[in-house]
């Protein structure tokens, strides 16, 4: 009897199956793991791309931040500059307002002064009209206004009284004494000497000066000085000397010399007043015959230029400061057209020295 083969529970076929199953599990695991790795790689690449994008955005943001900082600094600088300009503009505006306020107050003061001057002029004109309506009076030695003049009746002017013992007459002989109008002055200034001596305004000034000298009492002394940029006696050789009122021969010589004077150059009131102080025996009455404010001081300017009204007023004030207020100064003014401040200034000078201020009528003397 054949021997029964022994049956094995785990045979080779089973082991194969087991191995195959295990292999299948391993293969599945391997496939799953591979898929997971691919997915991780894909996610990693996506993340890397996002990181790269974010880095680019950060870099761009940093650049923009730098630009913004630069812009901010520039804006701050411009703001500071604008603030500084605004401060300067505010200060300039405030200064302009203050200047405008000062100008307004000055203008108002000038207007008030002009109105006062107009009132004074009207009063003087009224006084002149009253005097013209009065009777004509023969003047002692006053019938002859100058050498070679025909006899004529002269009128006294109230206030112009020769009461001093030593009377100094200052006659303006500058170019402005040629005419009342500036255009005519410029035209006549370039004319021959004979034409300048014959100008109507100058002839009137010569007649007034002659009339004044004829009114000097016999017991008094007098002198006549002409002035433009400098001052000196009309009668040569009599500087600092007093002439006797009773000496008719010398008076005639003086009037002849005055008749030959030619108006020229500018006006220095400072030098005219300086001549007063050069007398050893000073005058006790001064009569100033002029037509407007001075155009220069003690010396001529280095450059010949136009001088405005304000500068002429300053020169006048400078000259007035040298005047002896105890000596009366009578002013006879033959005003120029457009020289508005002159009457008020010379009226103030006469008032300061207790003298008389006169603007004679056109037909005097």
Image (tube, rainbow, N blue to C red):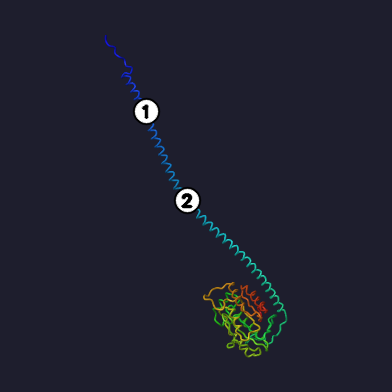
Q: What element carries label 1?
A: helix
Task: Give me the residue at 39% from left, 31% from top.
Answer: 36
Q: Is residue 131 left or right of residue 298?
A: right
- Residue 336 sits in quarter: bottom right
| Neighbours of disc 2 within 10 Å: few (<14), some (14-19), many (20+) | few
Q: Name the residue under label 2.
A: 69
- Residue 24 sits in quarter: top left
Q: In this view, does 91 lie above or below 133?
A: above
Q: In this view, does 229 lie above or below 91?
A: below
Q: Name the residue under label 1.
A: 29
Q: Is mark 2 on a helix, strand or loop?
A: helix
Task: Give me the residue at 35% from left, 24% from top.
Answer: 22
Separation of disc 2 and disc 1 at Cα? Answer: 58 Å
Question: How far across and down, in percent of the image, does residue 200 sit?
Answer: 61, 80
Q: Can residue 330 be seen in this view?
A: no
Q: Nearer the viewer, mark 2 or mark 1?
A: 1
Looking at the image, the residue that sits furthest to the left is 1
Q: Is residue 53 above or below residue 134?
A: above
């Amino acid at each position: 009897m054949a021997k029964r083969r022994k049956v094995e529970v785990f045979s080779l076929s089973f082991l194969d199956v087991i191995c195959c199953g295990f292999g299948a599990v391993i293969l599945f695991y391997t496939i799953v793991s591979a898929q997971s790795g691919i997915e991780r790689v894909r996610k990693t690449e996506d993340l890397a791309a996002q990181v790269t994008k974010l880095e680019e955005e950060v870099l761009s943001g940093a650049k923009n931040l730098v630009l913004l900082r630069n812009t901010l600094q520039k804006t701050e600088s411009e703001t500071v500059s604008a603030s500084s300009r605004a401060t300067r503009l505010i200060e300039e505006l405030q200064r302009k307002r203050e200047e405008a306020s000062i100008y307004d107050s000055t203008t108002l003061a000038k207007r008030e002064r002009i109105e006062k001057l107009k009132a004074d002029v009207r009063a003087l004109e009224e006084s002149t009209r009253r005097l013209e309506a009065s009777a004509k009076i023969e003047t002692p030695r006053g019938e002859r206004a100058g050498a070679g003049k025909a006899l004529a009746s002269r009128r006294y002017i109230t206030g112009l009284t020769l009461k001093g013992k030593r009377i100094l007459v200052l006659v303006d002989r500058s170019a402005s004494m040629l005419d009342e109008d500036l255009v005519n002055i410029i035209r006549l200034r370039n004319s021959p000497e004979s034409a300048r001596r014959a100008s109507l305004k100058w002839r009137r000034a010569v007649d007034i000066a002659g009339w004044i000298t004829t009114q000097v009492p016999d017991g008094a002394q007098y002198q006549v000085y002409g002035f433009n940029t400098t001052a000196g006696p009309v009668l040569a050789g009599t500087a600092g000397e007093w002439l006797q009122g009773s000496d008719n021969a010398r008076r005639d010589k003086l009037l002849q010399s005055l008749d030959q004077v030619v108006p020229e150059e500018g006006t220095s009131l400072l030098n005219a007043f300086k001549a007063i102080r050069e007398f050893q025996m000073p005058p006790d009455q001064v009569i100033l015959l002029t037509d407007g404010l001075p155009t220069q001081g003690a010396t001529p300017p280095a450059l010949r230029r136009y001088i405005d009204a304000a500068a002429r007023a300053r020169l006048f004030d400078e000259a007035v400061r040298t005047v002896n207020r105890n000596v009366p100064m009578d002013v006879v003014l033959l005003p120029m057209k457009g020289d508005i401040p002159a009457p008020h200034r010379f009226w103030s000078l006469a008032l300061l020295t207790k003298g008389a201020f006169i603007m004679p009528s056109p037909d005097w003397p």
